[in-house]
Structures are given as C-alpha cells and as structure tokens.
Amino acid sequence: MTHTRVRKFNTQDTYPEQNLDNDLCQAVIATGTTVFLRGQVAQDLETRESLFTDDPGAQARKAMENVSLLLGEAGSSLEQVCRVVVYLTDIRYRESVYQEMGKWFKGVHPCSTGLVVSALARPEWVVEIEVTAVIPDSNAS
C-alpha cells in the first residue's frame, strides 16, 4: 500500500519571503493505519496567515485546532494520538501551552516530549505541536 498525503503544499506558498521549493504535506497516512502530522502552529491552514502572535496559549489552541482537523481528515482523532512532540521558543511559555494541550488530550495519555528551541520557521511562531496517531480499525468490536 502506498502512503496517502493529506493537504499537499509547496514551501514557496507558505514561505514566499524565503528561497524555498519543497513539496510537503500536512499529514501522511502510512500503510493505512498510522498518521504522522506535520508540526502544527498558529496558522490558518487555508490562508496561511499567522495568528495570535503575542499569545503562546492562543497559539497552542490554534495548533491543536489544526491537529484535530487534520486527524479528522485522515480518518483519526485526538483520542487516537500516541505521541506528541512540543517545541517552544521560551521555557516560560510551557505552562500556558501545556494547560491548553491538556484540555485537548484529557483522558488520552499520549507519550510526550517537550523541547525548547532557539526558533521556529517564522519568528512570530513560539509553539509547534507535532503528533503521531493511529487510524482505528473499523472492524474492531
């Protein structure tokens, strides 16, 4: 089985100010059962507009909205998330970001890794959330 690519895009459209030309996508469904999401930020998936530039908690909320939407498009859901990787540009954002994520992952208990990095792809982004999930077996009882 081939992998399914969800919401394909080219970096020329996402980062027009940079000299990039990479074909990427928001999610990959591997062998029909595993979903790998691209790290999600506070960006409108349709317009590519950056949102909530001064609010790490609101950025986390928008990133989680994107995660939930993309998982749904891939046939999965937040309840099926196995792994989360969170990137922060400042350790002081941890509390507001994790409080917001906790609302979305209540009762899910995914494995989680948090990293503090010097920067993300755009200077206005301060949090990025990457997830791996499964697609539930519709034949399971």
Image: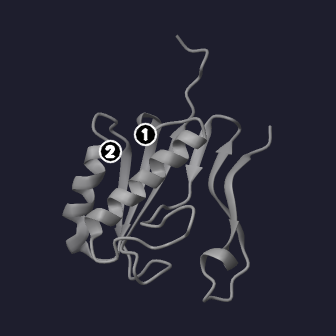
Q: Is residue 69 above or below residue 116?
A: above
Q: Is residue 47 above or below residue 104?
A: below
Q: Secondary structure at mark 2?
A: helix
Residue 11 position within the rendered picture, expressed as x and y whole percent measured from the top left: 66, 75
- For the point 59% across and 20% down, the residue is 138
Callout 1–callout 2 Cβ contact below 8 Å: yes
Q: Earlier in the sequence, mark 1 or mark 2?
A: 1
Question: Residue 85 lies in what quarter of the image?
Answer: bottom left
Q: Identify the image quadrant of the N terminus.
A: top right
Residue 39 position within the rendered picture, expressed as x and y whole percent measured from the top left: 50, 62
Q: In front: 95, or 9? A: 9
Residue 133 position within the rendered picture, expressed as x and y whole percent measured from the top left: 51, 41
Q: Secondary structure at mark 1?
A: helix
Q: Is residue 129 above or below residue 102?
A: below
Report which residue position mark 1 lands on: 78
- For the point 69% across and 83% down, the residue is 20
Q: Residue furthest top?
A: 141
- For the point 68% across and 43% down, the residue is 30
Q: In front: 28, or 55? A: 55
The residues tagged by marks 1 and 2 sit, at their Cα atoms, a distance apart of 7 Å
- Label 1 Cα neighbours within 10 Å, binned few <14 / some 14-19 / many ≥20: many
Task: Give the left or right position of residue 137, taking residue 64 as reference.
Answer: right
- For the point 69% across and 65% down, the residue is 9
